[in-house]
Structure formats: C-alpha cells, structure tokens
Image (tube, rainbow, N blue to C red):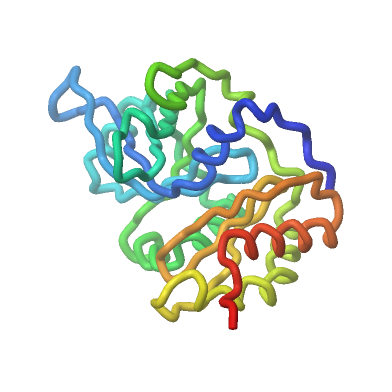
Amino acid sequence: MTAPDRDPRFEDARQLWAGRFQAVLTTHSVAEQGYPFGSMVPYCLDRDGQALLLLSHLAQHTKNLNTDARCGLCVAEGTDGDVQQSLRLSCVADAEPVDPSDRASHARWFRYFPASRPYAEQLNFRLYRIRPRRFHFNGGFAAARWLGQERILWRSPLGDEEELSLLRALEDLTTRLTERMGASGAPTRPVGIDPWGLDLAQGERLTRVPLTGPLTTLDAVRAAVQAALAERWPAPTA
C-alpha cells in the first residue's frame, strides 16, 4: 500500500478525530425548535475518515436528524486538568443513513462495537454516516482555527479485504497485550488499521495507537505496530 503524505501540523487533530470513539452529537431540536440538542454517542471512522454512528429510531437525536440532517460532532482529549488547555475538534456536518446493502460499513461498526449487534438486528437501530463540511480545531488556550475537511479526512489506501488480512496477521502481536493493557482479563483484539494508526479493543474499551510511516509493506506495518505497542505498553522487567 502507498500512504499519502500528511501535513504534520494537523496530525494531533487527525489522531484526535480517529481515536476518541465517543463524541457529543448536536442536532436541531424538533421538540424545541430553534434550539440545539446534544447527546453523547459512540462512533468509529470508515475508510474515508467519516464517522459512523448506530442510532435508535426512537432516540431524540435521530428524530432531529431525520427532520434536519445538519449536525455537529465534537470530540475532546481526555484530561484531568484545565479543559481549555486540551485538544478539541468540532465538526460541522450532514448526516445520512447508511444503505443496508453497504455490508463493509456495517461489518466495520460491529468489529468496533460487537455488543451493539442485537440493537441493529432486533431493535431497529440504524447506521448513519456523518459527512463533514469543515472542522474547527482548538489546540489549546487561544490556539484555534478552522480547517477544511481535506486537512482531517484521508482515505485509507487499504481495501476492506486487505485491512482484514492485516488485522489477522497482527493478532499474534496484540494478543500478548491483554495483561499489559489492564487487569480486566478481556482479550485484546485488533479491530481497525490504516497507515497512521492501529485500533485495539479490550472488552468494550477502544484504544488507538498512532503509527509512524511510511507503511508500504506488511513487514513495515508489523515493525511499526511492534515498536508502537512496545513503547506504549512496555513488557514487565524481571
């Protein structure tokens, strides 16, 4: 695979967008017209870098979106300190239902959130895609700017089958991480990979591990993953 070059000035914003997996979704309220309505939602990204959401047809935000597709998605860096010093990224976007025939997007969602499958199969939850128009990135106090979507969204050069093949090839590396990632004992699973990061799941916990490129071969991917995992979760010393 050939990974496109990315401007390093916006890498923090891209990794924040790719690696939070939960966001505040804002919609135009139907019940209180003219007012915004916010709710917390889980999300993951598709191969184009656009967010996928699984929404109940009974949820207020879904009713709002079905009336007015304009929305916002806001993600923020986790912090125990001053939130104004943390990274924040707001996306102005349009939402649209994902066609049920788009099996790749549905399969991707269930890799990241397998516990949600009964909601889709039994309770009429439906997958939506958030199509960004532009982003507003705040890199800390008094460090904010608008960014075009081309600064944040990059299509992964990996095809669906190629990505799945890579994930299977990396299972031997990631299964060794269960003990180092936490005490829950849940197995660690690789659920997504692109030239700039590896997404891992341990139970319901999702973690993104940024990678450094260029990642143009399987050997390069394995080496980058191994180095990143060792740096983030060092093996215990004797």
Between 230 and 184, the residue placed more toward the observer is: 230
The percent position of residue 67, horizontal first and vertical second, equals: 30, 28
What residue do we see at 26% from left, 25% from top? 28
Q: In the figure, 59 relative to 123: above or below?
A: above
Q: In the figure, 120 relative to 48: above or below?
A: below
What residue do we see at 42% from left, 65% from top? 117
Choose top left, top right, bottom left or bottom right for residue 74. Answer: top left
Between 71 and 150, the residue placed more toward the observer is: 150
**In this view of the protein, can residue 180 be seen by the observer?**
yes
- Indicate left or right for 103 with 87 as reference: right
Between 216 and 80, the residue placed more toward the observer is: 80
Question: For the view shown, which residue lies furthest in the left direction?
Answer: 32
The percent position of residue 95, horizontal first and vertical second, equals: 43, 33
Quarter holding the C terminus is bottom right
The percent position of residue 66, horizontal first and vertical second, equals: 33, 33
Labels in figure, total: 0
What residue do we see at 34% from left, 66% from top? 122
- Indicate left or right for 35 with 207 as reference: left
- Indicate left or right for 235 with 134 as reference: right
- Indicate left or right for 170 with 120 as reference: right
Between 22 and 105, the residue placed more toward the observer is: 22
What residue do we see at 74% from left, 63% from top? 166
